[in-house]
Image (cartoon, helix red, strand yellow):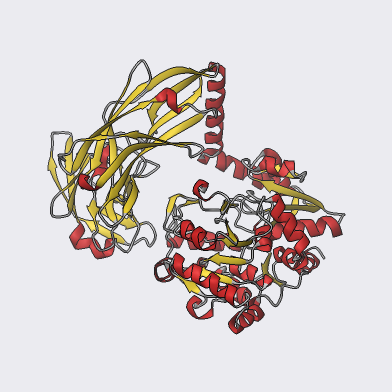
Amino acid sequence: MKKRLKPSVADIKLHKNQQMSLYIPISKEDDRINRLILINRQSSEEINLPLTEKDVNENLRLLYARLDYGKWKTKLLNGEIWDLYLQNGEGNHRLRTTKNAIELMRIKEEESGKTFHPYITKKGNVSFRFSEIDFFAGITNVQLSDQGKLRVEGLLEEVNLRNVSDANLLLKDALNVESRHPLQIEEQPSEGFHFFTTEVDLPETVTEELPNYLISSIELETDDGNQTMWRESPRLKYYSKDSLEEIFVTSFEDINVKFKISTSKIANYLTIHMLEDNIVKEFTNKLEKEIVKARRGKRALKFYKKVFQLVSYLPSKHNLVVFESFHGKQYSDSPRALYEYMKENTPSYTLIWSADRRHYEEFVERGLPVVRRFSLKWLLVMTRAKYWVTNTRLPNWLPKPKDTEYVQTWHGTPLKRLAADMDEVHMPGTNTLKYKSNFIKEANKWDYLVAPNQYSSEIFKSAFLFGKNMIESGYPRNDYLIQENNQETIDQIKEKLELPLDKKVVLYAPTWRDNQFYQRGKYKFDLSLDLQKMRDELGDEYVVVLRMHYLIAENFDLGPFEGFAFDYSKHEDIRDLYLISDLLITDYSSVFFDYANLRRPIIFYVYDIDEYRDSLRGFYLDLEKEAPGPLAKTTEEVIDSIKEFERSGFELSGSFEQFYERFCAWETGESSKRVVETVFK
């Protein structure tokens, strides 16, 4: 019997002609190798990399292939991520690597400004991707003194040092608190990299929050004569064959604090952990992490699914309703509206909320009946409930009991193309075919789907391939906007949020970008709206409230704009922010459909509309023709639009009225009642 195929990439070398050589040692007994292929993670398109080979010794041979970037450039640019596979008669096999520094091999795409490079995935596999990394840096050596001085040495991608006015090692902790440590950089680069050193006094980084950790990157301040820019490298990895495990203990306010300097298991990121030097607490923290890891593992999931299926055969409780909003992270949206209506009008039902473990206490503090998501109690509640009410997809592995009725309220009128209507999917952890298949599989479980208007009803049928009960009622969440739109309620909310009563409120609520992410479910967002210009022009009469999409992972530092800009992204329900806002700024988010119910001005800040419309999602509406407000591509244009609304007394155009009739006509403040009377009879 031949050995199981377990080859790996031993090295990747970059040549001056924009070609990369890949070297793969393999046992001579494995004579079934056919080809090396790159597969586009989104579209499943393939690129074949011809293999050649030579014998190394009597047991080993070396496969090598050449990736010609110039030849495949056009095709490569069609995908964000390409996964590397070795193929034999049994199928495709993902390749891992024995070399951590493969990301040093980088090709700069001059036209787009993107960089093409190999990288190691979270599972340790080799992939290639395009990224907008400005410059690259890595750590080659770490030394720790007895006094807690951490000396860090590394490589910095070649830059014009004449333009660099400041260079630091940037450390961020779990609370996003930053510290900077000056770099000493050798002027003469070698093989495209400068050598740098820096020193960190670990005791000075201690915080009151324990356990905590520090992650590292390089930050440069550059000035080319026209503008000054702050540029930051990706998180630093440790590129050395030597293992890294250093410990330093210091005292802080009568507590012994232990620093553990190590690397992440697969990606080799440098990590500095801070924790109390207490054996019991350290063991407890480690045990908790292992339990969470085990609960999220494939075996636990398989076991949990089987138990769920078995318990679901028990008879359902016909008066039990489970509510969930945004994966259990919020008490909000249409599930909240339906819960509050049923609590007042259908006392015979038992109503329970499903909450993510990280947000569980927020539900408890509100006095809500709640169960922790994926706990044993949750399993018993979900399998016995007659009704599920949610506004997002439930996990695909979760089977719906045969007696359960699934009410999907969804969470917005669609502007961006959805599910089966999308041409390509650019999200992490999936591809186009897999994404559509999983989405349709989930939609087939829905018994009821709530539509806010006729336009949405038609799109939902096509995008979700939905053919069951469409409830054409308007969105329950918008009842609040109709019923509570009065000055007393508005002032109460402003006081609660500590906003000035004598200033107008601008709400900025953008959406996420499919192709800008840290990991699955956590998306990047660059705040391109210039708050300094906004404050200079509007600060006397306005304040700005930020409300990011729940998938956006950024924490914005608004310290320089204290008293003018406020981040309420974590506020439980956006409906309060709608009510207090005199004007909305958004982009491609569906929030403008809901906000239009208030008959207030809307400005569309669409600085990247061409890319978003043509490359990422595509729109159902022609936003440039049908938007119920002006489109702006710069902060200056946004400011001009606000001033124009002021001059007109915030008067709305005729096109707005047409939009209102088309998308808001069903919203009369009784949508919750219509849904409850339809589903719960």
Q: Which residue extends farthest front?
A: 540
Between 666 and 8, the one nearer to me in the picture: 666
Q: Note whether 203 is above or below 1 in the view shown.
A: above
Between 436 and 566, the one nearer to me in the picture: 566
For the N terminus, the image quarter is top left
Question: Where is residue 191 shown, x and y percent of the image?
Answer: 15, 42
Residue 3 placement: quadrant = top left
Q: What residue appears at the point 55 percent right and 29 percent down from the top-left corner?
A: 209
Q: Is residue 416 left or right of residue 64?
A: right
Q: Is residue 261 left or right of residue 534?
A: left
Q: Note whether 651 is above or below 539 in the view shown.
A: below
Between 385 and 654, the one nearer to me in the picture: 654
Q: Is residue 648 left or right of residue 261?
A: right
Between 21 and 161, the one nearer to me in the picture: 161
For the C terminus, the image quarter is bottom right
Question: Where is residue 574 shown, x and y percent of the image?
Answer: 64, 58
**Is any part of residue 605 visible from this angle?**
no
The image shows a total of numbered marks equal to 0
Q: What residue appears at the point 38 percent right and 62 percent down from the top-left corner?
A: 43
**Is any part of residue 372 visible from this angle?**
yes
Question: Where is residue 42 shown, x and y percent of the image?
Answer: 39, 60
